[in-house]
Image (tube, rainbow, N blue to C red):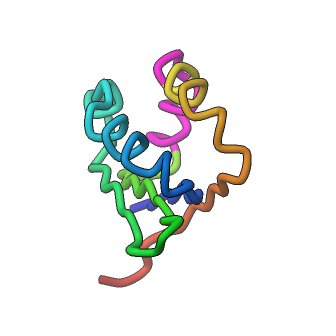
Amino acid sequence: MIVAITRFRASPEEADGWVQKLQERSRRVDGYSGFLGLEVLRSFERSPEILLVTRWKDRDAMRAYFQSEDFQRAKGASASQEDATFTMYEVVAT
């Protein structure tokens, strides 16, 4: 299994808007083969850190989504987060 984490900070004024936007997401990714789930996490800090944690069956499944038009649309909607980082992990034990 692959876990991909996108991480960014939101100003106090923007945090609620980001959370609402992510709660109202299109859910198109849910239909992709090998997609196992998404969690959105928010820290308790004044300028919270927001994490999007996606789980995938394998790299090929994740790669297929990243090459899709749906991903390009989702990526475009979050392009304003210039400080965002993206990291992939392989699950090696549970």
Residue at 37% over, 55% down = 55
Q: How many marks?
A: 0
The x and y percentages for residue 82 are: 73, 45
Check residue 65 for magenta coloring.
yes
Query: Taking 3 as reference, is 66 above or below it?
Result: above
Please tell me which residue lies in front, 64 or 24: 24
Q: Picture quarter containing residue 72?
A: top right
Q: Which residues are magenta?
A: 60-70
Q: Picture quarter containing residue 7?
A: bottom right
Residue sitting farthest toward the top: 69
Residue at 59% over, 57% down = 8
Please state if 78 lies on the left or on the right of 31 as rendered. right
For the stretch drawn in magenta, the main secondary structure is: helix
The x and y percentages for residue 35 are: 32, 42
Query: Taking 82 as reference, is 69 above or below it?
Result: above
Please tell me which residue lies in front, 46 or 73: 46
